[in-house]
Each structure stands twice: as structure tokens, then as C-alpha cells.
Image (cartoon, rainbow, N blue to C red):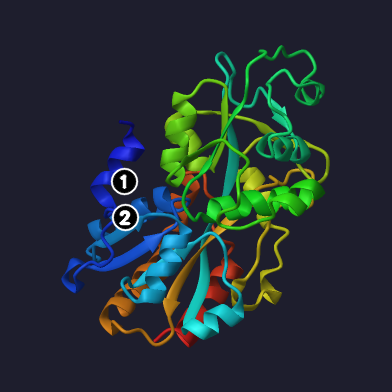
Amino acid sequence: MNMLLRSVSFFAASAAVLAVPAHAGITGAGSTFVYPVLSKWAADYKKGGGDEINYQSIGSGGGIAQIKAGTVDFGATDKPLASEELAASGLAQFPVVIGGVVPVINIPGAHPGQVKLNGPVLAAIYAGEIKMWNDPRIGKLNPGLHFPAKAITPIHRADDSGTTFNFTHYLSQVSPGWKSKFGEGKTVSWNGGIGGKGNEGLAGYVKQIPYSIGYVEYAYVVQNKMAYTLMQNAAGKFVAPNAKSFAAAAATADWAHAKDFNLVMTNAPGPNAYPITATTFVLMYKQPKNAAGSASAKKFFNWALAKGQRQALSLDYVPLPNPLVKKIQGYVSTNIR
């Protein structure tokens, strides 16, 4: 078992546990995308005298369901909720960190960044239209590379996933065929392939299955030493996933005009922008059922916004820009009791 999976089993509660007693500290559930940096924040926060964070890394859909059910102090999702849905549930929403969704491959001998893909080819692989690694459409993007005559095994998320939402949102932007047949969402009707639970489960399958392809948050790529692909962005450039390319995409985001921070930044313009850059959002009640737990969670996220952004950068996420942090702090102060 790798280090990330050990930390998940030690730190995060089981997906079967739907509620944590109030005395157990701050409770949260949702996004596996944010788990690596959230766990680092939680450890540093507790070391500094703060409350313990008990977080269930179960996927964005589970996080949304649990905060709506009132069984946790906060939910985390990589798919922002519309203002109408937030209002109907009495929720507020704010971003906490930016990262990237990265295609990963298991072709024996392939090195990180050696293989290039673009959106239409990636969509065709997941649609089942490109079935073999030696397909000419892959070869055209990679002159000089020899691909084996082996079947591609696409790995996708089996749970309701914000990572899947951002991945399929991107595919819908770059492939009309994908948009019309499969669309976007936390889950879609996949055309075959194998489903893995959480970013960690999907990464585990790709590592185990030769000639497979998957998509995970970049921290999982680094942690598991996986071979990633370069992706062609909206400017036609092939870019590697890293903090700089995520930041280049994030720099194009118009947060000032995004009501309740409802913004998705996939397929961002610019020569250095990574095309599947994403954000994790925290969901909390405006008038919480557990006032003490909510107040503690607010205190933790204020700390994370003010002092935790450096850890985000060290784990290859992108810190939120200072003007956005100030806007979030004002929003939280105004909207969450």
C-alpha cells in the first residue's frame, strides 16, 4: 500500500460512516481531489493547537449529500453548485485551492510527459472510438514514438466525482461528439472501461493494469510516481501539468463576476495554461445546525486561506491569489454565522 493510501485510511473516516460525534472535532466529507492538501492543512492546524479535522475522502457527490443531510460541518466539491441550489439548501460556497486533472497512462517504458494527447483524441479514447494504442490519431500527435498494438483500458471514477465533472466538462468543450453522446457531470454513462473509487482508487487501477489510461488530480500523480501525458491547450501548445501551468489557467478566471464563486476554468486561454485546471469548493450552512462545529470550521478555513496556501504550493496545487482570498473572507464573514 502506498503512502497516500495509508494516510487516507489513517486520517479519513470510512465512506460507510455517515456521522461523526460532535466531540470528535471538525467534520467534513467530499472531494478526493483536495485530500492531499487538506490533510496537510489539518495536520499543521492541529500541531498549532487547532481542532482535529475528521474528513471523509469519499468524492464530491458524497460531500454534497452529507452537508445537505447535516451530518458534517462542511462538504467539499470540485463541481460548484448553482446559486439556486445553494439557496434552496441554505448553503454558502467558496473556493479553497486550485489544482489540475491529469491524464495518466501505464504503457511499459513510457516516461512522464513523453506522450502527447489533445482533447478530441482523449474524448475518442473514452468514447471507445480509439481502442488501440497504435491508432494513427495517437501516432500523429507523437511523431517518432512507437506505440504497441495493445488495447487501451480506460479507467474512470465509479463514484460521484467532481474530478469527473471537470474532466467531462473539458471533453464536452473540445469534442462535440462527446458532448452529444455523454455530456458532463459528476458521473456519466461510460462506454465500458473500469471504475475506481476516488482519485486514489483510480490511480491504483492505472498502476496495476498495463496499457490503461486514467485521470487524477496532480498530487496523486506525484505521490504515485505515475506517467502523465502532455495536453494540448486552447492555444495549441502542449503543456505539462504543474503549478505554473495551473496558475496560468487560474489567472484567466473572472472571480469578480462569479456569483457564489460558481466558476469552472477548464480549457482556459493562453499559451501556458493547463487545459483541465480545477477548483475545490467548500460548502457550509449559512445558519448551521451545529453552531459550534460550524464556527470551528470557519476558523480552520480562515487559517487555511491566510496561512495554508504555502503548503498548497508545496504539494503542486496553486494558492489562491490575495484579492480572491480577501473576497472569500468577506463572503464567509457575511454569509456564514
Quadrant of the frame with the N terminus = top left
Task: Give neighbour class at mark 2: few <14, some 14-19, many 20+ (Cα, 10 Å).
Answer: few
- 294 relative to 179, above or below: below
> Residue 322 falls in which quadrant of the image?
bottom right
* Residue that carries the numbered disc 2 in the rendered image: 15
As shown in the figure, which amino acid type bears the numbered disc 2? Ala
Q: Position of residue 201 (x, y in %)?
A: 42, 39
- 15 relative to 259, above or below: above
Q: Is residue 242 visible?
A: no
Q: Secondary structure at mark 2?
A: loop
From the viewer's perspective, tell me whether residue 110 is left or right of residue 57: right
Q: CA distance from mark 1 to mark 2?
A: 11 Å
Q: Position of residue 45 (x, y in %)?
A: 30, 60
Q: Is residue 83 visible?
A: yes
Q: Residue at x 63, y 21 (%)?
A: 151
Farthest residue toward the left? 23
Q: Residue at x 49, y 87 (%)?
A: 334
Q: Secondary structure at mark 1?
A: helix
Q: Residue at x 20, y 73 (%)?
A: 22
Q: Position of residue 213 (x, y in %)?
A: 58, 31
Quadrant of the frame with the C terminus = bottom left
Q: Position of residue 182 (x, y in %)?
A: 69, 51
Q: Residue 8: give its label.
A: 1
From the viewer's perspective, tell me whether residue 283 is left or right of residue 277: left
Name which of mark 1 and mark 2 comes first in the sequence. Answer: 1
